Image (spheres, helix red, strand yellow):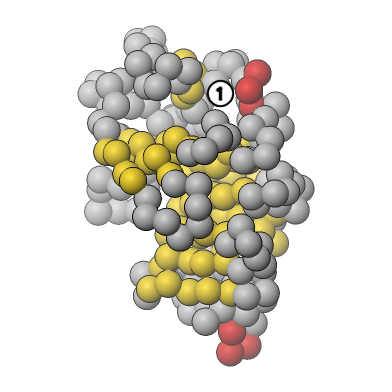
Amino acid sequence: KPGSAATVFKPERTRATAGPPSSALLSRVAPTFGRLWNVIEHRLARPNVGAAEPCEANALCLLRLWRTDNQGRNWRPVSQLFGVEFRHRVSALAVSPTNPERMLVGNQVAIHWNAQALSSASTTSWMGTSPRAGWVSSLVFDPLDADVAYATYSNFGGDHVWRSADGGRSWTAIDGSGAGRLPDMPVHSIAIDPTDRQRLYLGTDLGVYVSADGGAHWA
């Protein structure tokens, strides 16, 4: 929810293989760029789902998107199942800070997008696109432009950072070029400087990388 702080739902890694977990991390993020984040870890109780729901008995089901309107006391599904296999589990989520109707959900299969997310229900089918194969490790919207979003991938091989200019419908790789190209490594997170939206930061297996030109070059 837009405001002085944002509550972020982020699946927590609990297995040795790349992929989403069966519990969740709730983070309250300070609005000022660079300020220390206050992180509250909370293992969520499994929602009351039907017997046919393909979830582990003691886990939050991550095969679809869930929403709470009362700070986590109750949850309701706001999407159809993204699939029934482990690779369909949600690994990343983003909500536009300027338009909460615009949301993105990622897993190993695709990046799913919705331009009317607030009216979504358990029967809503989210459209999806697959820029590349692999786990989507993070998603983030531009702080001022709801059409612009970024995605990262936590796999070796291929491009690791992607940009969308149409709310997630299509994606362009921005791993850089020449001496400013990223090495082949998992990328786990991306942050945008709100005072200079061309300045991007990446959290990777090899440390923090920064681009001052929107991903054309990295260092």
Q: Tell me the kind of residue under disc 1.
A: Ser
Q: In percent of the image, x 58 and y 89: which residue is there?
A: 179
- Mark 1, Cα crowd under 10 Å, few <14 / some 14-19 / many 20+, is many
Residue 54 sits in quarter? top left
Return the residue nearer the eye: 121 or 140. Answer: 140
Residue 115 percent across, percent down from the top left: 71, 32
**Would you say residue 187 is visible in this rendering?**
no
Residue 80 in the image: above or below residue 82: above
* Residue 57 coordinates in the image, percent (x, y): 25, 21
Q: Which residue, given by chain and number where applicable, does mark 1 sit on?
A: 79
Residue 106 coordinates in the image, percent (x, y): 52, 43
Q: Is residue 199 visible?
A: yes
Vertical comparison of 46 with 4: above or below: above
Q: Residue furthest bottom?
A: 179
Percent across and percent down for residue 129 are 65, 45
Of residues 119 and 153, the one drawn nearer to the viewer in this rendering:
119
Query: In the rendered view of the protein, which quadrant contains the N terminus?
Result: top right
Residue displayed at 38% across by 73% down: 207
- In the image, residue 125 sits, relative to residue 210, either above or below, namely above
Q: Residue at x 54, y 21 (%)?
A: 78
Q: Element at badge 1?
A: loop
